[in-house]
Image (tube, helix red, strand yellow):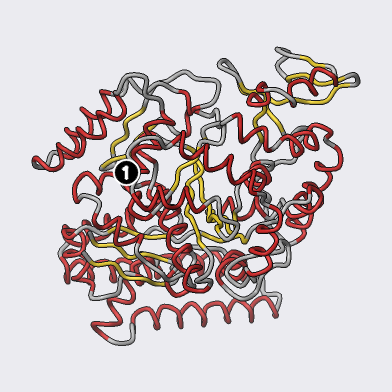
Amino acid sequence: MNIQNAPYPPKALSDFLRQSAWGNKPSGLYPAEGLSANVTPILEAIAAKHSVAQRSVLQSVFSDQMCGALSDVQQQNIHLLGDPNTFTVVTGQQIHIGLGPAYVLYKIVSAINYCNHLKSQYPNQHFVPVFWMATEDHDVNEIAYFNLNQEKYTWDKPWSTAVGDIPTSDLAGLFDWLETQLGGGEAVKLRIQAVRNLYLKEGATLASTTMQWISELFGKFGLLVLDPRDVRLKQLAKPLFEKALQGDAMLEAFQSSTTALKDAGQIPPAHVGKSLLFWMDGQRRVRIERTSDGYHTIDGSFQWSQDEINQILGSDAICHLSPNVLLRPLYQQTILPCVAYVGGPSEYLYWLQTPNAFSQSGLVAPQLLHRKGGVVVTPSQRKKLDKLQISQIACFEEIETLKQNIVAKELGENELLSAIAETKRQLENQLKTLYGWKSPLLGESKKHVDAFVKWNHKLGESAIDAFVESKFSADNWGSIVQILERNFSVSNPQERQLFWVQYYFVYGQYWIEELAKSRGYAENDAFFLIEP
């Protein structure tokens, strides 16, 4: 096992995110932005606002939802949630068959790492990592596939409401496919069989299997897993839902923060529409909008007067109200004593659309953190990459840049490329002279110069390719390029393609636990370089 820590690779994050999330230059769009935020006032405000009664409800919900075999640390954390000096660090994700791409792993271990980091800074407080399952999402196409070894398994599952309720009893084919794809020895088959048993257990749903599997993987680190659909949690959020249904003030708050984000040169990920709540039942999850005399769902299934909406808010039927992407952070802060939220690049940006709504609702905005990232390189891949004699971070360079670096390392200054560049400069100067003279030969000259420059550039690339292939052989270089493109692409990052549990099945979970043990949370250890 070899795990190294490094900053995010160049170009893997925008300058905006790098400065706001990891540097000391917050944009000023959010009250507790990035690692540079002061956590102390957040702790004080949450301790004052989150009542003993709310904490008691939260303890009951976790105890009921996670009623299976809990680790001692998980049981202790549920108990500690009753203490005003206990706070949560939250991350979340749509629940995905196979737990999703690698960035889901990095989110979870980031939340655990940050709890470790906070504990070292605030030894008299307790910090509990929480994974928020987005069970209320209804876009099944985003979660119904599994990528493995450049192959894709697709779960054909018609569904139109909360994905947490999807039965998983018809996923036997997924595990047959995994066994075929992974092969391996008895240990691999036993791990696949254990997960198969979870998914195919009578009455199992995507929510129940996800909760149990994640709990088993990270239980020794005290991670708690939450399904936010519990009616007791929705009842805690009644004042928030009332404001959301009233609409105008909260929508204006989201819109003003969204405008500020646009003015900062960023594209807001979330659209501020006409509504903030969905109606969710066994058949549908559809937006609720105000009408001239009450409310209705936009598909026409339901309509309510104000009195009828008040009755819903005051009864168990409130569980049918489901927050949209912008209201979800406020719902989180209503029910959890959350000091920090850990999100990916898009989440970080849409949280920047929320600060005015937090203020308008009287809620404490948590510290906003960017998750760690990472890349996994197998032993066989590492053996091939070692021939490049460069660091793993250097592998994130463009392929053409790497080729030039290899030539420079072997031969010193690349005289051929220097000569090509100088020739191009001289020809461009000739064209400038012809332009200044208003020469009738300018058009014809430019045509020939452009053709020659293009040919000369191609000559340089071909010469570099021939040199690199002579050093590695064409087949070896081709396999190296394939590894670089699959593992180290900035535009198509591995963490969005690779399903991390494939390495859990092959190597077990010890390497996952090594990631979770980290106590560092800083710019220089924001990215994991993993060799399981």
Above or below, 377 against 414 in this view is above
Viewer-proximal residue, 284 or 236? 236
Residue 67 pos. (x, y %) = 40, 35
In this picture, residue 150 sits left or right of residue 93: left
Q: Quadrant of residue 38?
A: bottom right
Q: How many marks?
A: 1
In this picture, residue 376 sits left or right of residue 78: left
Picture quarter with the C terminus: bottom left
Viewer-proximal residue, 47 or 155? 47
Q: Amino acid at mark 1?
A: Glu
Taking the spot 64% from the left edge, 46% from the top edge, the residue there is: 329
Above or below, 414 against 362 in this view is below
**Residue furthest toward the right?**
292
Taking the spot 67% from the left edge, 45% from the top edge, the residue there is: 334
Above or below, 15 against 235 in this view is below
Picture quarter with the N terminus: bottom left
Residue 88 pos. (x, y %) = 54, 55
Residue 60 pos. (x, y %) = 52, 38
Is residue 402 among the parts visible in the rendering?
A: no
Label 1 packing within 10 angstroms: few (<14), some (14-19), many (20+): some
Q: Which residue is mark 1?
A: 216
In this picture, residue 308 sits left or right of residue 455: right
Above or below, 44 against 410 in this view is above
Residue 226 pos. (x, y %) = 50, 40
Q: Quadrant of residue 25?
A: bottom right
Is residue 523 among the parts visible in the rendering?
A: yes
Taking the spot 37% from the left edge, 25% from the top edge, the residue there is: 155
Viewer-proximal residue, 268 or 368? 368
